[in-house]
Image (cartoon, grey):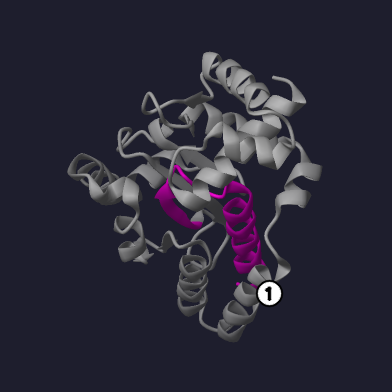
Amino acid sequence: MTERQFQILAAIIEQHAEIAAPIGSVLLAKLFNVSSATIRSEMSRLEEMGYIVQPHTSAGRIPTDTGYRYYVNSLTQNPPIVDKLAPPDRGARAIDARVSTHVNRADRAIRSAVDSLVELTHNLGIATIGDELYMSGIGNLFSQPEFLQSQHTLAVARLLDNLEPWLREAAPNEPLNVYIGSENPIGKTSGATLIISRFRSPYSDRSYIGVLGPTRQSYAKVMSLVRHTGAMLEEVL
């Protein structure tokens, strides 16, 4: 993939996260200050490689799970891109301020961290607290346009029902783990992404905090916030 193709893919992902609609060549041509024909040529190449798809004949393109994975891997492996796309510091400061008020109550600190992630990412927030699974913001999840169709709703519900035992079995061992759409072993057709961080707590060496939302995410922002929250909890607790 060329650098321009990657930048176009990144723009499609970020714009799609904002407007929840296919992204057309006219918008991208304005962003990149090139002709629509040039953008259409590059989009055709990205489609051939499986990174984007055209949902309707006359529509623009949306990312595929493969496209999202390529983008997420690039964010993980290329720190300058992460720095450039990272969220404003005020989000991290807001989490720090809320969590630090509960330094003597681990359960409250974790719940406060989850609630902060819900507010900042507009996703469902989750955390394991001992043998319990805490969830907040389920209304956020099912208000997303992707989950208004019954088959997606059922797939997401199945994922949530089995999330705790799956986490115990999978035991994600990285500070940040991202499971995109069909990568989820449960609810493969849900169109959901799980972004989760492992941290040490008084309850367990394998406590988790993160968010569940549509694959249509502003990944740079959400990944940064989840990673920061996990690190903050480990430090405070």
How many numbered circles are shown? 1
Q: Main secondary structure of the magenta part?
A: helix
* Up-down relation of residue 25 to residue 18 (above or below): above
* Quadrant assignment, res 89: bottom right
Q: Quadrant of the N terminus?
A: top right
Q: Is residue 174 left or right of residue 169?
A: right
Would residue 11 be seen by someone viewing this image from the given angle?
yes
Q: Position of residue 150 (x, y in %)?
A: 18, 44
Residue 137 part of the magenta-drawn span: no
Q: Position of residue 107 (x, y in %)?
A: 46, 75
- Front-lying residue, 79 or 202: 79
Residue at horizontal 73 percent and vertical 31 percent from the top? 34
Q: Position of residue 104 (x, y in %)?
A: 56, 84
Residue occupied by mark 1 = 93
Q: Quadrant of the C terminus?
A: bottom right
- Front-lying residue, 14 or 95: 14
Residue at horizontal 45 percent and vertical 38 percent from the top? 22
Residue at horizontal 41 percent and vertical 51 percent from the top? 213
Q: Is residue 178 left or right of residue 187?
A: right
What stretch of residues is rendered in magenta? 208-237
Q: Return the residue found at the far right.
A: 80
- Front-lying residue, 227 or 153: 153
- Front-lying residue, 143 or 201: 143
* Up-down relation of residue 93 to residue 66 (above or below): below
Q: Position of residue 25 (x, y in %)?
A: 57, 32
Element on which disc 1 rests: helix
Give the residue type that dot 1 points to: Arg
Q: Residues within 10 Å of mark 1 (few under 14, many from 20)?
A: few
